[in-house]
Amino acid sequence: MKSNKNSLFWHDSFLILAMAILAGCGLIYEYLLSHYAGRVLGAMESTIYAMIGLMIVAMGLGAFAARNIKCAFNGFVWLELTIAILGSLSILVIGGFIAITQTFPLIISDMFSLPPDALPRGGIFKQLSFIAFNSPYFFGFLLGFFIGMEIPLIARIREEIHEKHLKNNIGTIYGADYIGAGIGAAIWVLFLLTIDISKASALTAALNLIVGSMFIGYYWHKLNWKKTIVTLHILLFVIVGVVYQQGNTWLNQMSNLLYIDKVVYTDKTRFQQLTFTQRYMGAEQSNVISFYLNGRLQFTSSDEFIYHSYLVTPVLAGSARHDNILIVGGGDGLALRDVLQWSPEHVTLIDLDDELIDIFTKPEDKLPPKLAKHITELNQNSLQDKKVHVIKSDAFIAIDELLAQGKVFDAIIVDLPDPSHPDLNKLYSVNFYARLKQMLAGDGLIGIQSTSPYHAKNSFISVLKTLEAANYSSVQQYHDNVPSFGEWGWTIASKMGASPLQRLQALEKLPVEHFWLTLPMIKSSFEFPHNFYRDKNTIPINYLGSHAIYQLHQSAWQDQQGLNNSHLQQ
């Protein structure tokens, strides 16, 4: 009798531990697919919520479907094999499907010598592309469905072992499930987020296989098709190992197919995916280098000077002094390059991604030689200038430290990516702009990258209204065409005194001559089409936590550009 109790104790311990491990794996699969789907679809926040919600519903359906499995022991082994297959390969399949649907029109175009503006993007091509970009939801549903079967099957196995109905069976299983899910969430945040997504999926699938293998050892006498099951486990362990070693390379190769130009370097930092592409322009011209973050264009070497000259020159030309400058963002050093032409005494630059900053500070240590040389020529080693102090931190937090130190800046330039992610929304808020205002000298100006007034008009105007709500004395906007981005816009504001445009109009020439931009060009850029601000009163101010500007930007991006070109948008 005592021996039987000991045996039941060890069986129970194994099953409860297995449930906790599998619960952690299930939660990690939710995060993996949600994270990847957000990168693919662009609408990060809504995609994550939709994916998690879909998988929870699918888990409920899976729990119902588990009633139809006759043998819980055999069913559980096959279930873990299925989950491991889907978990390890789904992201690779999604990436491959998207790459094929995006490159197929180009293949057809080349085959029939179609012009660039006649790519076959409609009809069946559009439908296939839509299916491909939404395929993460399909795999999320499948994984959720099978994960949902785990709890009912383990509950049945426990009762079959005890040969009776267990009063607290469900409570015990759910307790293990909740604890395991919590541990899985911690592992995701502390470890799996820092490694390649293919490695994370392979490691998680390996845990499913390990649990399945241990289950086979415990309940060998209960199983059918034993040799087949063992062979499949061994084969899948090999596949998972290959995915761990080569998965990221394959994903990068498939992702590279989405870019028009040749990908010459790609890497993943803790915060984002970095990609450099190169377009060969012939022996007599320099190659065109483009830089992408998470698939969104940040600059192209052929016209980045247009964007950066408009970002920097009006702000510094309209400020009374240029001794002490603050740049928020701009880790590529290009805005900094233009600022240094004004001979400041000190420049402070704040950027979150230390790995990105390292690449642009010493490109020769990180990039292929030819690419490194081109980057050095672009930013002119600006990040290595002795006048520059780089703060590798979240700007939202770092400015509090600068305020505590009593820092005051003659001009402030905000060169952040578009508010295409919830984490960026706070850097476009009244709270953030009001704190920057405290550090701005009374006769200085602040300039802000403000997305496209054509493609994202409402979010562009929202930046204006948000700065006004932060009590800047005068807030104005200007725009021009940047070929790589299309129509682009900036916002400029004064803390007190004359408006930015009045200050610029009072100048006879630019204090520091620019090789391309002229004072009349700057003045004319403040003109907008008739009734451009007609609906200004209906556009929300972006308060901290409201996500107003993020939602405006996402809505405009989806309406104007669609999901098919997500990899081409800033």
Image (tube, grey):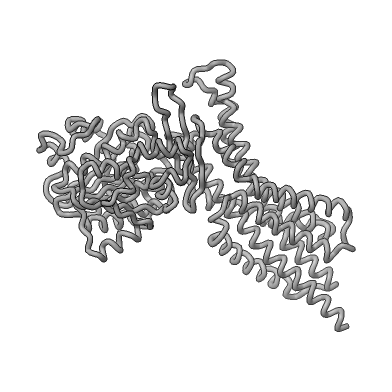
Number of marks: 0
Image: 528 above or below 6? above
Can you see residue 79?
yes
Q: Position of residue 456 (x, y in %)?
A: 36, 38
**Residue in the foreground of this view, choosing between 67 and 127:** 127
Judge from the rendering whether residue 20 lies leftward or rightward of residue 542; answer left or right: right
Q: Position of residue 307 (x, y in %)?
A: 31, 36
Judge from the rendering whether residue 110 lies leftward or rightward of residue 350; answer left or right: right
Q: Position of residue 568 (x, y in %)?
A: 46, 35
Judge from the rendering whether residue 102 lies leftward or rightward of residue 343; answer left or right: right
**Residue in the foreground of this view, choosing between 106 and 74:** 106
Of the 4 image quadrants, the one containing the N terminus is bottom right
Q: To which quarter of the image does residue 206 belong?
A: bottom right
Q: To which quarter of the image does residue 483 belong?
A: top left
Image: 331 above or below 71? above
**Residue in the foreground of this view, choosing between 1 and 551:** 1
Q: Residue at x 66, y 71 (%)?
A: 175
Q: Residue at x 83, y 80 (%)?
A: 5
Image: 181 above or below 458? below
Q: Residue at x 56, y 31 (%)?
A: 102
Q: Residue furthest bottom?
A: 2
Q: Position of residue 337 (x, y in %)?
A: 29, 42
Image: 341 above or below 105? below
Can you see residue 534?
no
